[in-house]
Image (tube, rainbow, N blue to C red):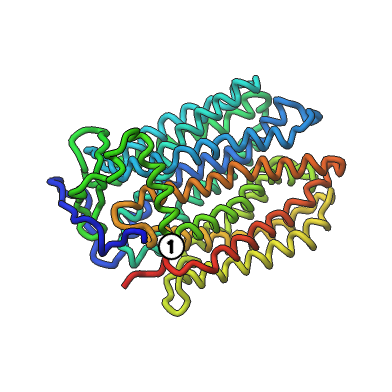
Amino acid sequence: MVETNKNLEEMDFLPYEPRMEPSAPDSLSVKRTIFISFAFFIVLLAWSYFNFKVPLLISDILGEGYPFLDLIKGSIMAIDNIVAVILQPYFGDLSDRTKSRVGRRMPYIIVGTLISAVFFITIPFVQVLAGFVLVIFLFDLAMSIYRSASIAILPDYTPQKVYSKGSAIQQFIANLGGLIGFIIPIVVGAIPGLSGVLFDALGFIIVGILMVVLLGVLILTVKETPTGDKFLKISDKKIDIDPISYKAKISREPIKEAKMKGKRFISYRQTVKILRSHRDFAFFVATVFFMYLAFASVESFFSSFAIDYIGITEGEAATLFIAYSGPMILVAYFVGLLGQWKKVGRRNAVKIYLLWLIISVSLMAFLIVPSIYKNHQPLLVMIMLALTSIPWMGFIVISFSILWALAPEGRKGIYTGIYYTFNQAAYALAPVIFGGILTSVSFLSDYRYIVMFPFILICIAIAFLLFIPIKGGEVKE
């Protein structure tokens, strides 16, 4: 059996006072939650622009007639996710055991954001494929340092009973970052006289600067409880933050795996152990994998789908992304409330949203998409994207509540890391799998994108079946 709060080792409080005013029991500080959410805001800001623009840059570098273009494009887009699959449990576990004067998560957020911003700005200036791939790899590596920490920092300072509300606010703020990432191509495209490298680079520069500025805001407003005297030191003991008092506490016993040889592999041993012993969590991350396999296929190829299949411009394609992300932002807080309602609960709320998605995507696959080929009329797609994005946000918000409820005390970092391992495994495989599918039907030319939404529908249906056996994840009384 996976460890629970009842059989945890006893914890000793560390001699450091909280630097933020603690929350009242079972209440949520909205202001603090907004500022904490800036960490994830930075992540989605960068990824939304990255996912929109990088496939187009690859097409420019290779040329539209290049053999196996879709497969190569998908493989390059998968690099970040492959890196994340390998590193997310590692950095998630490290942040659970970090002794730092600025807290457990902030060292990773600070270092990762600064390094990734530098490489992000560099991407459009590299016009040779090998160098382009290298810069993307280094950017992905830097992003992996802090992706888990940007999520795990919220439950550290949020009482368990209000996880759904906290997650809803976090997703609302973070997806504003995603929306801004989609708006930037429209703004850049409206500037007269831009062409060539400057046209491609300006958006990356704007996003990179925003990443650093928002990091500054985060540092000034979020004062994590210190867990040590240095900037970064790794303990062999689990450290936790009490979500009511904000005091740091440390396990009296070192993690058993730390006594083994090859300590650098502790995180991966723990990952295997958790998945073997925690059945609900294993089914949960399998559900997450198939859900993100579906939507990662959309994100990686949607700009190409919009331009090649519908026949619209790059700026109009960005507008479709706004139709997708805009409703997600508007409903982020409200979709989380369904999981908070005791008569429904988190698991039933997820099932409702998955069924909604199955209906919406079925309409896209068999009615909408076949009717819009080369007709330059994206309005129907905008409507259906909006209807699809609402339940998708519902799944995302409540899935984090379930994740944090399943994670035992002192393990939220590694559980979040494992979540991102499956999340990013999906993102890694989706461009390759769907790029391969598109390549296999390349004889259809631009019409090959007709297979996109049926593929997504199959993934969501599998996710729904995997979610049914899950029993845990509800509010603990």
Q: In which quarter of the image is the C terminus?
A: bottom left
Up-down: is 39 above or below 350? above
Amino acid under disc 1: Ile
Q: Which of 157 and 169 is in front in this view?
A: 157
Asked if one can make out residue 390 in the rendered structure from this viewpoint, the answer is: no
Residue 363, picture quadrant: bottom right
- Tell me what residue is drawn at x 23 percent, y 44 percent: 254
In the rendered image, residue 143, in percent from the top left (x then y), is placed at: 46, 36
Q: Quadrant of the N terminus?
A: bottom left
In the rendered image, residue 332, in percent from the top left (x then y), is placed at: 49, 61
Q: Is residue 160 left or right of residue 371?
A: left
> Callout 1: few (<14), some (14-19), or many (20+) C-alpha neighbours within 10 Å?
many
Asked if one can make out residue 92 in the rendered structure from this viewpoint, the answer is: yes
In the rendered image, residue 315, in percent from the top left (x then y), is placed at: 69, 42
Residue 105, picture quadrant: top left
- Tell me what residue is drawn at x 40 percent, y 69 percent: 474
Up-down: is 394 above or below 21? below
Q: Nearer the viewer, residue 326 or 159?
A: 159
Residue assigned mark 1 = 402
Residue 408, picture quadrant: bottom left
